[in-house]
Image (cartoon, grey):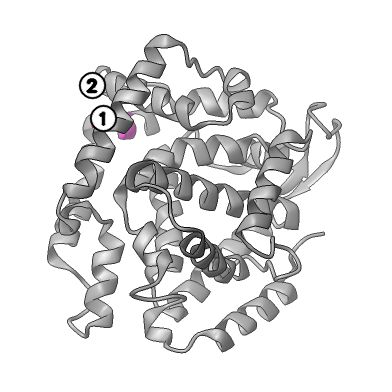
Amino acid sequence: MTVSREDLAAALDELAASVVRPEHGLTGPGSWSWRIDRESVLFLGGGRAALLQLAHPFVAHAVDQHSATRSDPLGRFQRTFDNVYAMVFGELGQALRSARRVHAIHTRIHGTIDEDVGAFRRGDRYDANDEGGLLWVHATLIDSALLVYESVFGPLRPVEREAYYQETKRFALLFGLRDRHVPRDSRAFDDYMRDMLASDTIAVGRPARELGEFLFQAPSRAAQPPLRWLKSMTAGLMPERLRAPFGLRFESAERRVFRASMASLRRVYPRIPERLRVVPAYSHALRRVSGRGDTDPIARFVEARLPVLASVAGFTRRAER
C-alpha cells in the first residue's frame, strides 16, 4: 500500500492536534529526541543508515533511477539534512511543510525493479511512498542513531529508550505512517529490525552495491584517509550479514581501527563542551524557543563553512564530473 495525499493529510492533522506548543516543534526542549538527535557524532552512523536503506530493493532502485546522488552528492546531502532537521528541531509549521514537500517529491518516484533480488523479481513495481519502504527508511535512522549514541554515551535505561522511541512515532506521522503501521514500543521495534534483517526483503542487489561503493569513493587525495576511516567505522557498525554484500572489509586491521576509534570517542566526545558538539539546527532551535531570535550566530558561522570543508575534501569536484 502507498501513502496517498489524503493519508498524509489525515496523519498530519493527527500530529498537529497532539502538539501542545507549536513553536517548540514536535517534541521540544527536554525531549529525548532533542537530547539524542542534537549530537553531531550521530553523523558517524550516516553511512550505516544509508547502506541499510539501500539494502531494501525498493529504496536502491528508486535512488538509482531517480536520485541526484551520483551527480550531486553534496547537494543531496544538504537537502536531506535540511528536511530532517526541519522536522526534528523546527516549528510545527516547518515540520509540516517539509513533510508535504518530501511526499510531493516521492509521488514522482516510481518504477520497476530491474533484477531478481531477495524476495523481489525483475519487473516488480516500487513506489517511494510505499508504506513498507517508508517504515524501513524511518527505522534505519532510529536504529542507527540509537546505536551510535549508546556506543558513545553508554546504554540508555529502558524507560529512556522507550521515551525516545515513542517520540519517534510523531516523526513517522510526517511520512503518513500511523500507529497501525509502526511497532507499538521499543521492544517491538527491536523485533521488527531483527526480523527485517533476517528476511529476504533486505537483500543487496546491483544498484545497492554500486551506490554503496560510490559512497566511499575518494573524490580527491585529501579525502582518502577520512573516507577509509569512515568505511572501517561503517563496517563495524553494520550488521554482519550485510558487510560482504556491500564489499565492507572487517578484518583485523579494520577491527583495530574501529575499536580504538570507539574507545577514543567514548573517552573524549562527551567531554567536549555541548556548545561545540551539537548540530547547528539545535542551537538555532534553542534560541527560537527562548525568544532570542531564530539564528544562532556561532551555528551560522559553522554552517557557512560546511560547503568550504566539503569542497576541500573534493565533494564539489566530484559533483562537477
**Badge count:** 2
Residue 101 against residue 94 in the figure, above or below: above
Give the residue drawn at x 60%, y 52%. 139
> Residue 1 occupies which quadrant of the picture?
bottom right
Q: Which mark is residue 48?
A: none
Circle 1 sits in a helix, a strand or a loop, which is it? helix
Mark 2 is on which residue type?
Ala
Start and end of the magenta stretch? 313-317
Residue 299 against residue 46 in the figure, above or below: below
Mark 2–mark 1 CB contact (< 8 Å): yes
Nearest the eye: 282 or 3: 282
Mark toward the start of the polypeptide (2 vs 1):
2
In percent of width and height, residue 114 lies at 78, 30
Mark 1 is on which residue type?
Ala
Nearest the eye: 314 or 289: 289
Q: Which mark is residue 313?
A: 1
Q: Which residue is mark 2?
A: 222
